[in-house]
Amino acid sequence: MSLYPAPPRTLTIAGSDSGGGAGIQADLKTFTALGTYGLSVITALTSQNTLGVDGIAAVEPEFVSKQLRAVVGDIGVDAIKIGMLHNHKVIDAVADTLTELFGGTGDPRYPSIVLDPVMISTSEHVLLDSPSLPALQQRLLPVCTLVTPNIPEAMKLSSIESINTVDDMKTAAKKISELGCKAVLIKGGHLSQPQVFDVLYERESSEFTIYEHPRIYTKNTHGTGCTQSSAIAAFIAKGKPLREAIQLATDYVQAALLSSFDIGHGSGPLNHLV
Ligand code: PLP
């Protein structure tokens, strides 16, 4: 009998970053820093450091499903973050196993799922092959609580050719939500203004929320998207409503970016010990 209450359980379904700055490693650091118990289902291995990705080894889809069954069957999860999925076979395996464990789309047994639709790394390595985009749209978006694309990912998901303003971001967010997810957060960091605007659209209420924060000028940004989506999942697991979870996660990422450090020879990681 333990005297310590168990913390909320957060699961990341994502790719490993051997350099420790992004992917599974960033997610688990974030989960721990925010007081949750981190679980992981690894979808791909990357050989990578601060200079970029130099190789990817796929994980067999059946083994992705096996990891998912193992953690959900025994430990259970309060919120899930999904990141790099690598290919459509892994997307199908994740979607099929989520259905097996939690039921069909809209089943109340589903935990909250935050999907970071990772496609290309900052170092321009393809992390999701483009033929897999329809599988992501059709099989995973409908079960997600929140999808968190950056601007290039939002352009792909919405088939909108240019997104240059907050109004464009609103149009794209609404269009992406029509794929069935409950909410969409488009991150505006790729636009060039000194203030960054992230746009949230919630489908049920048709409401927009704009999050504004100053741009932090540092080369050490590796893993920012991974950290933000896993922080949102952690705050949801701790019981925060979606809008507040996003604000708290954004504050966490800002603090982690402000204290990010030089390690290796390229784009260093965020600092999770803030
Ligand atoms: N490697 C893995 C395993 C990732 O999941 C991601 C992003 O999601 C990256 C690399 C890319 O990180 P960044 O674009 O921040 O360098």
Image (cartoon, rainbow, N blue to C red):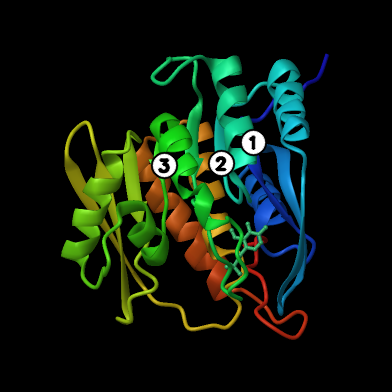
Q: Amino acid at mark 3?
A: Gln
Q: Is mark 1 within 8 Å of ligand 1?
A: no
Residue 234 marker: none
Q: Who's the residue at 71% across and 38% down the image?
A: 41
Tell me the distance, in whole angstroms, between the alpha carbons under discs 2 and 1: 6 Å
Left or right of 244, for residue 92: right
Q: Amino acid at mark 2?
A: Lys
Q: Quadrant of residue 170?
A: bottom left
Q: Is residue 238 visible?
A: no
Tell me the distance, in whole angstroms, between the alpha carbons under discs 3 and 2: 16 Å
Please provide percent x and percent y for residue 69: 72, 22
Please provide percent x and percent y for residue 86: 63, 51
Q: Residue at the right extreme?
A: 1
Q: Secondary structure at mark 3?
A: helix
Quadrant holding the N terminus: top right
Quadrant holding the C terminus: bottom right
In the picture of the structure, the residue carrying the numbered disc 1 is 11
Residue 137 marker: 3
In the picture of the structure, the residue carrying the numbered disc 2 is 81
Q: Who's the residue at 73% across and 34% down the image?
A: 64
Foreground residue, 186 or 28?
186
Q: Secondary structure at mark 2?
A: strand
Asked if disc 2 and disc 1 are in contact, CB closer than 8 Å, the reply is: yes
The answer to whether 89 is drawn above or below residue 62 in the figure is: below
Q: Who's the residue at 51% across and 56% down the image?
A: 130
Mark 3 vs mark 2: which is more N-terminal? 2
Left or right of 172, for residue 16: right
Q: Who's the residue at 57% across and 56% down the image?
A: 129
Mark 3, other Cα within 10 Å: few <14 / some 14–19 / many ≥20: some
